[in-house]
Amino acid sequence: MLPSGVFNRRPQQDMAIIRTRAQWLLLAGGLVFLVTLGLYAPGHWMNWLILVGVYAIATLGMHIMTGLCGQFSMGQAAFMALGAYTTAYLGTRYGVSPWLTLPLSGLVAGLGGLVFGIPALRIKGFYLVLATIAAQFIIIWAIKQQTWLGGTYGIRDMDKLSIGGVEVAGATAEFWWLTLGLVVIMLFIAKNIQRTTTGRKFVAVRDNDLAAEVMGINLFRTKLLAFFIGCFFAGIAGWLWAHNLRAVQPELFSFQLSLWFLGMIIVGGVGSTSGAVMGAVAIMLVDKAGPSLSTAVQDAFPSLKYQVSGAVSLIMFAVVVIFFLLIEPRGLYHRLERIKLYYRLNPFAY
Amino acid sequence: MDAVLAQGFLNGGVYALIALGFILVFKSSGVLNLAHGQAVAVLSYFLYYMLVVWGLPAWLGIVLIIPLGAVLGVLMERLAVRPLLGQPFLSVLMMTLMVSFLLEGVRILFWGADSFTLPFTPRQGQGWLGTVLPDWINPSSALAFAVAMLVFVLLTLLFRYTKVGLSMRVVAADHEVAQSLGIRVKRVFSISWALSGAFAAMCGILVGMVFTVTPIMGSTVLGKGLPVLLLGGLNSIPGAVVGGIIIGLAEALGSHWFSAAKEVVPWIVMLVILLIRPYGLFGEKRIERI
């Protein structure tokens, strides 16, 4: 909804993602803030920022698959692993340029998604969830079995990324800028998928797949496409993560991580592109607060001698998601929209 | 080979019992309770705690843990699932997952990475059961199988001959019809969650006996229960038993031939079944209308 006095005079205005001057200013300010963050943020926040970027890309994939098309996936981490292993293996074994493996990682993950997405044509709901859980376990198990992928040890000592002679690796400002750039590009792609024919087809399939089929949408194609795009995003996220750590190992891509992505889209708001990023940031902020809370818990109850930090981060994640499910089921995005609407209409109620 | 097949067959009984806990809830309230695995783990850790730290006798611990499981089931239904009545499928599924995270967190806080053997586990060559059975049969598996079959028969009798069972069947068929016939649908939900919780406690005892109580117990239970559930069909009780035995045998044979494949055989069997018969061996095929 536009503020009073602002009209769309041309179709381009109606289609624009960013409509008013204030929004342009906010965007520019926000980007400048995020870019300069790389210059003064301390090391551990740098790591955190990059991880948020990686997770945000994977969550955008989940958003397309689950939020738009309604095809639940609990195997996103495994598809990330496919992307990460593609670039790690080709890079260390054959010396393929990482920039060449960027689209390749996405493609491999996407193809993996297609293989496990084919049952999705016939099944939905619980059955689909179970099939994707199976994908998670089978893919990670298969990776662990391969000696040429390093088994449980994984692949270490990947070459550093370089852009025009500048080395980009680890928790540095350069890597953060690369992450930020990728996130912005993927966000743009996701947003545009959402508002074109494809995205509308996805939404139609989500809302009622039988009705969508009756209206002439090719269910098989649409569902598989959603799987492909969602897993493609996961592959890109995996590529980025692999180059950040310069090592991959199967334990990184756990079932729990897949569930984190689901939690992120729920916290952000199901079905909204920016919500996916907001959810990733929110969940990761909570996770960042984990260590301090767990030391507090440990100080308060010294009798708990076990892995308090692991338990506390699990419990915190669960509590946050439960809070959103019960109190704010439409997520952060919806709340933000409500706040914006309130200030736009103030002092009137509507 | 005989030993492998026998062990797989007996394990199948335990898997069936795990799957029954899911089916009871799914049949009546249409919720796939992913917290079941962690509930099993928490209950069996608590049982061990009662037996060893409080020093209760084994029979008293078993008598106490089953009602406790039922209480846990009712609490989960009341506090977590009922507020989400009528919400989309993803919300309810996520809620049960988050409950499982909570349970796991609590378990880690109190018991960490410890693993235990339940003190009353029957052993080979010891006690009555250990000497009667031939030595290629694991007595704890045999006992677990016997209990699972007994529970299955009791459950069938409950559904067929009692009023509670009848009302659960009506609710499973249609909530609105059940309500208009004067059945308290919400109470039936509570009863089925309580039963499922009691099943979780029983699974905790039996799985703890067969596989020992370990930190990965929750995910093991989930990893065995879900394929069985899908193979048999989400709402079929005989399906769970048949599915459990099939998965048990497939797993035993699979790990006999490729020892590394033990953990994924159930999932692969499940995916194949999904491709051939998407609604499981005994599940009802849902006919949807727009």
Image (cartoon, coloured by chain):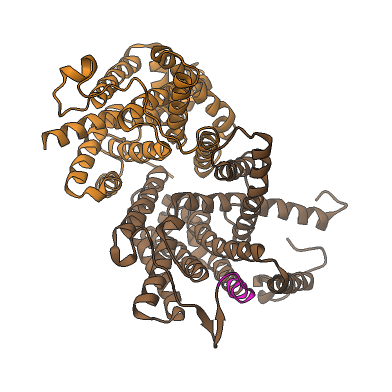
The residue furthest left is B1
Q: Position of residue A264 (x, y in %)?
A: 57, 53
In the picture, the quarter occupied by the N terminus of chain A is bottom right
At horizontal 64% and vertical 39% (from top left) the residue drawn is A298
At horizontal 68% and vertical 72% (from top left) the residue drawn is A38
Asked if residue A171 is among those painted magenta in the image, a careful observer would answer yes
Q: Which quadrant would residue A47 be assigned to in this image?
A: bottom right
Res. B31 visible in picture? no
Q: Is residue B21 above or below residue A43?
A: above
Q: Is residue A298 left or right of residue B107?
A: right
The span picked out in magenta is: A170-180
Q: Is residue B68 left or right of residue A213?
A: right
Residue B97 vs residue A289, the one in the foreground? A289
Q: Is residue B249 left or right of residue A88?
A: left
Asked if residue A300 is among those painted magenta in the image, a careful observer would answer no
At horizontal 62% and vertical 53% (from top left) the residue drawn is A268
Chain rendered brown = A
